[in-house]
Each structure stands twice: as C-alpha cells, then as structure tokens.
C-alpha cells in the first residue's frame, strides 16, 4: 500500500447525500478480485448514459476534476453494502482522500485498509471547501499534522492514531501481518514444542 503523508489537489465536489456503495461501483463490476481497473467504472451510472457514452456535465468527467485526488462528498457517504470494491474504485481513479461530514462505518474503515484517508469534518467546512472546488483552487491535506490547509486557513481533523500510523507507513492488513512474522514463527515453534498435536491437527 502506498504511504500517505501530504496531498495537494483541486477537490471535486459531489453534494449528493447518502451515496451508497452501489452508486460508487455498481454490482455488475464486482466480478474481479483485482484492485486495479475499476476506476473507469467509478460512479458509472452518473458518469455514463444508458448507451455507455460519457455524460460531459458530470464533474469527474470534466477537467481539472477528472484529475482530482480529493473528493468532497455529502453526508453518509459509502452507505449500503460493505463491498471493498468501492474504495478500490476510488483509489484506482486517483482519489486518495474523501472528505465528508459523515461516513458509513464499514466504508470508512475499508478506506484506511486500502490507502484512502477519509476525513470527517463539520458540514460547514465541507461547504467552505466546496467553494475552492468551484474556483478550481487547490487544498492541502497533511496527515502527520492532521490539517487541511486552504487559502489562509488551517482546519484540524481527528483520526484514530493506529489508522493514521498504518496510512503513513503504507500498511494494509497483509502488511501488518508481515511485520509480525518473527513473532508468528516464534509462537509456532513454541506451540510445536509444547503442544505439537495442535499444529498437526491444523
């Protein structure tokens, strides 16, 4: 997983509330178990018409927003089913940070596990940041300092220390397990000596 320190981008703004995971990545694209290739289908039903043609007015189909690394979203973002393909699609599109006043819990946690920083802030701040999106101005995220910088203003945000550490070090669940390999090996050797029937039966 790519390490996350700072991020600067013109944000894209989707004001819709209750955007669920099926809107983020529809069910017909869930056949793959790869984390790549889903970006082209992100928000498929909003980005393409019934004939599969690009809807030019949709924000992520327009420059410079089609290069945004930061998404500003309406409240309760990521609700619905718990599909991990949703953060995969966002990340594959290039979005590394989602800012909203509220998230669905499972989606929120899945973001951290896949290298995306979800930031919860007051709705008033989301609206203030949306003005920077409309004016095509960059904002900056500093995870180490837990700050959002825009114009002459700096806003702090909260984040769980363990989740923050994992993003900064680029550790997903597999990476965390790999860091414990020596401890796992030592434990298995101890079990093999003291209770050998456990590993044999496993």
Image (cartoon, grey):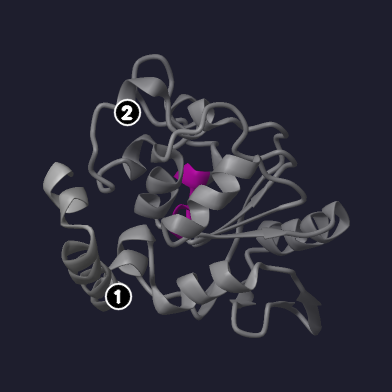
Asked if residue 5 can be seen in this view, the reply is: yes
Looking at the image, which is closer to me, 12 or 171?
Answer: 171
Circle 1 Cα neighbour tier, 10 Å, few/some/many (<14 / 14–19 / ≥20): few
Q: Which tag is nearer the camera, tag 1 or tag 2?
A: 1
39 versus 165 height, above or below: above
Task: Give the residue number, with chain letter if any, for mark 1.
Answer: 183
Q: Is residue 16 magenta?
A: no
Q: Position of residue 136 (x, y in %)?
A: 63, 64
Task: Give the residue number, with chain letter if any, for mark 2.
Answer: 30
- In this view, the residue farthest toward the left is 200
Q: Mark 1 and mark 2: span between their CA atoms?
A: 36 Å
Q: Which residues are magenta?
A: 60-67
Image point 65% across, 67% down: which residue? Answer: 160
181 versus 191 height, above or below: below
Q: Is residue 61 magenta?
A: yes
Image point 77% across, 56% down: which residue? Answer: 126
Q: Position of residue 143 (x, y in %)?
A: 59, 77
């Amino acid at each position: 997983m790519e390490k996350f320190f700072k991020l600067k981008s013109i944000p894209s703004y989707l004001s819709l509330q209750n955007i669920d995971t099926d809107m983020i990545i529809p069910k017909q694209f869930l056949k793959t178990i790869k984390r790549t290739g889903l970006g082209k289908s992100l928000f498929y039903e909003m980005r393409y018409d019934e004939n599969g043609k690009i809807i030019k007015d949709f924000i992520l189909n327009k420059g410079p927003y089609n290069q945004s690394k930061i998404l500003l979203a309406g409240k309760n973002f990521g609700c619905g089913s718990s599909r991990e393909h949703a953060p995969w699609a966002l990340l594959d599109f290039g979005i590394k940070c989602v800012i909203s006043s509220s998230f669905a819990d499972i989606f929120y946690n899945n973001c951290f596990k896949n290298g995306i920083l979800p930031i919860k802030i007051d709705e008033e701040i989301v609206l203030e940041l949306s003005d920077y999106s409309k004016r095509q101005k960059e904002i900056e995220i500093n995870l180490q300092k837990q700050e959002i910088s825009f114009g002459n203003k700096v806003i702090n945000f909260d984040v769980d220390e363990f989740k923050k550490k994992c993003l900064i070090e680029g550790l997903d669940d597999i990476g965390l397990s790999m860091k414990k390999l020596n401890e796992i090996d030592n434990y298995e050797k101890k079990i093999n000596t003291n209770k050998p029937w456990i590993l044999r039966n496993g």
